[in-house]
Image: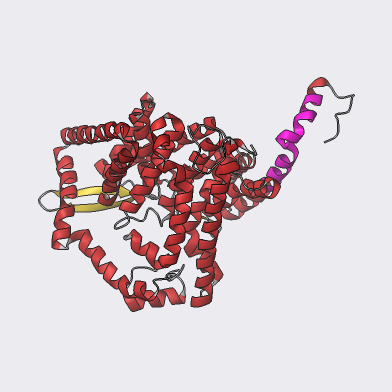
Amino acid sequence: MPDAPPSLPRGLSLWWADLPTRRTLWVLCLTSVLAVVCGVVQMMALNQFPILLPLGILLGTAYFLLAMSRNLGALLIFLLTFAEFFGLLQESSEVNGIKLIDILTALLVVPLVIQILRSGFPFHGAVGRRMRRATLILLVLLGGEILLTVLLSEQGLWLSLKAAKPYSYYFAFLLVPIYADSPAKIRRLGAGMTAIASILAFMYLLISMLGEIPSLPGLIVGEANFVGLGTFTRVRSNGAPLVVAMLLYQFYRYASGRATRLGKLALVLLSIGAVVHFYRSVWIGVLAAVVVQAGIEGKTGARTLGKLLLGLLLLSVAMGVINRDYGEMILSRALSTVTEVEENSGSYGVRQEQIEAWAPILQENWLVGIGFLHHDSTVGQQMEALHQLEGTGNYDIGWVDLMGRLGTLGIILLVAALYLLSRSAWIPALAAAGGETAILAKTLAAWLIVGIVSLPGYPLLSSGAGIFPLALLAGMLAVLEEHDESPRELPGEQEGSGNAGR
């Protein structure tokens, strides 16, 4: 950028000198173009309701401005959309035939693409090398499975990409340094994720007590039957795993003595939300995660585990006081796990039947899996009819979904990528050091354990709902490591390289 003309006033001269660092001109021009495109899309989608056009254009323009200026608000708006605006908007909502969440995803990724083209990989130094290897492995995994699906099944590329969409959320960690590139922004992102998850948990509690609310179509409501106890209203949505992830985050903040009053209130709401979500595999996963993490930390972890058990006891007593039947139903749900396994009944028996249906498919495709077959494709429908499957994937049994789609080779690649994304989270010295980096390290490690333990009954590692929070936590931890908040370097990593390229 040339020097400012001498005739300019001092204020304009300062603005002119600062222009290259803020990249104001290209951001303004690109935002204007995208805003016009957004307006056209809104007009095409909302032409039957002219009164909504100004609002649609305004909201679209605001989102473009936030995304192109790399404002954290854009990522939080996407999180709200991902959580279906607390049930107000279904995940399948479309604008002119295209899912709204896909449109917002594409716009959110634009600054990442610009960053890669202009400056290279968004992470740098030793952390960047590790995250770059994880990215390469994920690219090989997804790209290879999509290619094999197209070549071996003759399914079209578009349907293969649609079926692979949930796994693409593993790349969400790349977005974090674009929209939250400092420790302060990471803390704000954690607070925003907690707020969204807490409100969603409150909506779960409200519906479980009052029943289905027609104005919240994004929340899936079902009735769980209990012999001698009647029925219990259970609630779930695409944002349910976010509730559990933020429950772990706020629990570790509380256990480390860094929780605020709002954080403690959020912890209570998130705990209740995880309970009324009513998936036993997730309950077991959370308990197992804290136990394993306690083993990593040593004495400090033992105190953390004690706080969890005390909290569970107090929560159970409080819920029993509020509604005795409510407490009995939850206790019955927990105890029925043993009964179902012994008698091969209930949801355990249903899952056993599904495993039997999948068994021949897993035996024939044990190496690379069936790939990303879509239930709308001819070959996908033929497989469903031949083996009496509910779908080409099975979200009720997470490990079957992973093994069926990816095969043994694909799972090995996925494990390698997950290890690289979470490598520092398994270092005892980091977990015991305290600070925000340690809290995120514990949360990421615990979330991975929850995902693994819950695989027999919940697809946290194969559905976008579970993958997205995991990827965000990995990106948040990596950003903090780059800013040298980590108390020690990883083995083999050069000291002081965390901030390289920043």
Percent of width and height locating residue 421: 48, 48
Residue plotted at (33% across, 68% down):
390
Q: Main secondary structure of the magenta part?
A: helix
The number of callouts visible is: 0
Residue plotted at (52% across, 53% down):
134
Q: Which part of the image, by quadrant, shows the C terminus?
A: top right
Percent of width and height locating residue 487: 48, 32
Work out whether residue 393 can be spotted. Answer: no
Q: Is residue 328 above or below residue 405?
A: above
Q: Residue furthest left?
A: 228
**Colouring of the image:** secondary structure
Compare residues 105 and 294 and report the one nearer the observer.
294
Q: Is residue 440 above or below residue 235?
A: above
Percent of width and height locating residue 441: 42, 39
**Magenta-drawn segment:** 12-35
Percent of width and height locating residue 194: 41, 36
